[in-house]
Image: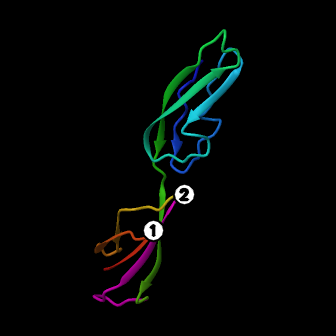
Amino acid sequence: MTWATPAPIIFGTALSGTQLNATASTGGSFTYSPVAGTILAAGSRTLSATFTPTLTQNYTSNTAKVTLTVNKTATTTTITSSTPNPSSAGQSVQVQFSVTPTSGYGSPTGRVTVTATTGETCNATLASSAGSCSI
C-alpha cells in the first residue's frame, strides 16, 4: 500500500479522490477517515486509509496515515454603508461592513479595523460575518 502526501488545500475544500488516493499492488478496497466530502478546519490534519485485500488468505489488511495541510481561506472585507454620507469635518461616521470568505465556506470571526483616509480608525468584532463601528 502506498499513499503520497497530498498537496495542501484551502479551508472550504471538501476531501475527494484527489486527497484520498492510496493505492495497492493487489485487488481490494480502501476505507478512509475522514470520509470523502468532509471539510476540515485549517491546520495540519491526519488522514488515514485502511486497505482490505480481496484475497485475505494471501494478503493482510494495512493502514497508512498522511498529513494534509489545510490553509486558511482569504477574505474580502466590504464597506456596506457609511452614515452620514457625505459627512462633514469633525462629524462621527458610522461604518458598516461585511467579511466574506473567498472559498465561500464558513463564517469569519475576529476583529476588523477600519481606517479613514484621514488616519482615524475604529475596531469592531464580527457578528455573523458583519459589523459596524464609528470613526
Residue type of the residue flagged with mark 2: Tyr
In magenta stretch: residue 96: yes
Query: Residue at point 39% right, 79% down?
Result: 95
Examine the image and state in which quarter residue 53 appears: top right
Residue 99 pos. (x, y %): 46, 66
In the shown orientation, is residue 64 left or right of residue 20?
left
Q: For the residue labelled by badge 2, is the local secondary structure a helix, a strand or a loop? A: loop
Q: What stretch is highlighted in magenta?
A: 86-105
58 to the left or right of 93: right
Q: Please name the amino acid that badge 1 sits on.
A: Ser
Label 1: which secondary element: loop
Q: Is residue 108 magenta?
A: no
Residue at image point 44% right, 61% down: 108
Q: Name the residue under label 1.
A: 129
**The furthest residue to the top:** 58
Q: Residue shown at 44%/70% (left/top)?
A: 128
In the figure, 102 relative to 24: above or below? Answer: below
